[in-house]
Image (cartoon, helix red, strand yellow):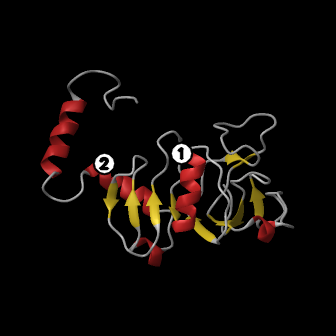
Amino acid sequence: MKHLDGGRKGGVAAGLAALLASLAGSGPALADQALIDDALAAAAPGLAEGAKVVDWEGTVLKEGANGYTCLPTPPTLEGTAPMCLDEAWMHWAMAWQHKQPITVDALGIAYMLAGDEGASLVDPYAQAPTGDNAWVEEGPHLMLIAPAALLEGYSSDPHGGGPYLMWQGTDYQHLMVPVGPRD
């Protein structure tokens, strides 16, 4: 992780530490609020208010009770990719994160209304575009998981003008549903 002060000790880092300490008694720290704001950018307005927000280590940054959990952009990514997941998607995400098999047996809905900076259409673990991993950058979209039989017949072509399958044929396949323009 890069230091805010370019690697120098003291200076900016000490000032930031003092600022964060001064905010400790008055609500979430500035850094936590930035993560909360990023995470909630993925949700529809009515959904955001009641959603729980957690960081990628599982720390709860905001309590919620509507069944959705929002996560900020993963720290391993540059750009924007926050998401809000229902319970079925949370189970899916844990399996994906730990590279464990999963059989989807219920419908799940996830929101990524801030869009994302891209992912491979074919490789669930690709970190960057290559000549053969069909990299797709998507604008605002929903994602649906469902039992495999319900996803049969959907195209995996992201340029076909409608929903498309991502990671087709893997345990992690899901339907991408664009709801806005791509950058």
Q: Position of residue 30 (x, y in %)?
A: 27, 51
Q: Using a 10 Å C-alpha cutoff, classify the residue at mark 1 as few (fewer than 14 neighbours), some (14 to 19) or many (20 or more).
A: few
Q: Secondary structure at mark 2?
A: helix
The residue located at (41%, 70%) in the rendering is: 51
* Label annotation for residue 161: none
**Along the viewing direction, whichever of 76 and 64 lies nearer the viewer:** 64
The residue located at (39%, 61%) in the rendering is: 53
**Along the viewing direction, whichever of 67 and 21 lies nearer the viewer:** 67
Residue 144 left/right relative to 30: right
CA gap, disc 1 and disc 2: 17 Å
Residue 179 left/right relative to 158: left
Q: Is residue 120 above or below residue 157?
A: above
Disc 1 to disc 2: CB gap under 8 Å: no
Mark earlier in primary sequence (1, 2): 2
The residue located at (71%, 37%) in the rendering is: 129
Q: Where, by quadrant of the figure, is residue 5 drawn?
A: top left
Q: Which residue is mark 2?
A: 31
Q: Quadrant of the C terminus?
A: bottom right
**Along the viewing direction, whichever of 100 and 82 lies nearer the viewer:** 100
Q: Using a 10 Å C-alpha cutoff, classify the residue at mark 2 as few (fewer than 14 neighbours), some (14 to 19) or many (20 or more).
A: few
Q: Position of residue 171 (x, y in %)?
A: 71, 53
Q: Where, by quadrant of the figure, is residue 18 drawn?
A: top left
Circle 2: residue type = Ala
Circle 1: residue type = Gly
Q: Secondary structure at mark 1?
A: loop
**Along the viewing direction, whichever of 78 and 92 lies nearer the viewer:** 92
Is any part of residue 114 visible from this angle? no
Instruction: Residue lying at the far bottom in this picture: please name it.
Output: 46
* Label annotation for residue 79: 1
The residue located at (20%, 59%) in the rendering is: 27
Q: Position of residue 150 (x, y in %)?
A: 78, 71
